[in-house]
């Protein structure tokens, strides 16, 4: 299996780049943010719970997120591997993913991080609000909250993969194609 974690702050381009990477490598895309949004649209219990956190730019609790992620992996028994987008976002999630994959005699091949300066993230998210229809992109306070939570809780997850020798980083600035090329060469390296 080929399991890649695509990492980076909100607005770094993880969703856009995932689309290219899943086609390039023939993997299944697992975006926890997308799965939460589908649940909100379908008005499921999980969606109702997630929405209160997402509207404020807070993380959905680990327990809920981890069990949802495991269920999604299990729903794809024929996958050649996964692109994890927006997961893991806490060290507890990274540890749970590691334990879950080990149980399945599987592992993460690499974490690839997209590096984008904070000012650029804010500009991108507020611009994206016009087309994404996402309330959490449109409100500057929520955007700031998401970035602050990323810095406090998510950025340390990189250390988990660095200490396993699995961390790679590329610049997330430039054209979509340029960034895809950087990601592919980092993954194939
Ligand atoms: P995203 O689409 O990745 O920007 O995620 C949108 C929102 O979904 C986040 O701001 C969180 O509220 C929630 N979310 C997505 N992934 C996770 C995760 N791995 N852990 C906790 N909350 C998450």
Image: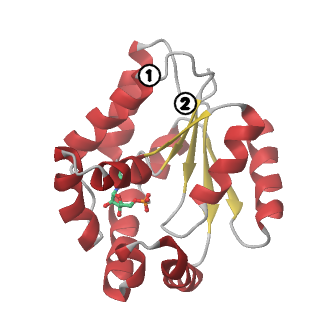
**Secondary structure found at label 1:** helix
**Secondary structure found at label 2:** loop
Q: Quadrant of residue 5?
A: top right
Q: State whether label 1 is within 8 Å of ligand 1.
A: no
Question: Which sits earlier in the primary sequence, circle 1 or circle 2?
Answer: 1
Q: Residue at x 58, y 22 (%)?
A: 79
Q: Quadrant of residue 59?
A: bottom left
82, above or below 56, in the image: above
Few, some or many residues within 10 Å of mark 1 (<14, 14–19, 20+): some
Q: Position of residue 19 (x, y in %)?
A: 66, 49
| Left or right of residue 112, residue 89 in this image | left
Residue 17: assigned label: none
Q: Quadrant of residue 111?
A: top right
164, above or below 131, in the image: above
Q: Position of residue 115 (x, y in %)?
A: 62, 66
Residue wearing tag 1: 101
Q: Residue at x 23, y 55 (%)?
A: 50
Q: CA distance from mark 1 to mark 2?
A: 8 Å
Q: Position of residue 131 (x, y in %)?
A: 54, 76
Q: Position of residue 99 (x, y in %)?
A: 36, 24
24, above or below 57, in the image: above
Outermost front residue: 42
Residue 108: assigned label: 2
| Left or right of residue 44, residue 119 in this image | right
The image quadrant where one finds ligand 1 is bottom left
Q: How many marks?
A: 2
Q: Quadrant of the C terminus?
A: top right
Q: Are marks 1 and 2 in contact (CB under 8 Å)?
A: yes
Q: Nearer the viewer, residue 95 or 175?
A: 175
Q: Residue at x 35, y 85 (%)?
A: 139
Q: Quadrant of the N terminus?
A: top right
Q: Residue at x 46, y 52 (%)?
A: 86
């Amino acid at each position: 299996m080929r399991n890649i974690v695509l990492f980076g702050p909100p607005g770094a381009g993880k969703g856009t780049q995932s689309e290219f990477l899943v086609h390039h490598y023939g993997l299944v895309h697992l975006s926890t943010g997308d799965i939460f949004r589908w649940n909100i649209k379908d008005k499921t219990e999980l969606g109702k719970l997630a929405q209160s956190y997402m509207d404020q730019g807070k993380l959905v609790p680990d327990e809920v997120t981890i069990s949802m992620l495991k269920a999604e992996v299990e729903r794809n028994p024929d996958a050649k591997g996964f692109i994890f987008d927006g997961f893991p976002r806490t060290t507890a999630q990274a540890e749970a993913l590691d334990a879950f994959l080990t149980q399945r005699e599987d592992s993460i091949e690499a974490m690839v991080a997209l590096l984008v300066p904070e000012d650029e993230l804010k500009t991108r998210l507020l611009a994206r609000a016009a087309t994404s229809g996402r309330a959490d992109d449109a409100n500057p306070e929520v955007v700031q909250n998401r970035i602050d939570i990323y810095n406090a809780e998510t950025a340390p997850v990189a250390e988990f993969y660095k200490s396993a020798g699995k961390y790679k980083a590329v610049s997330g600035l430039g054209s979509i194609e340029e960034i895809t090329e950087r990601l592919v060469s980092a993954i194939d390296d």
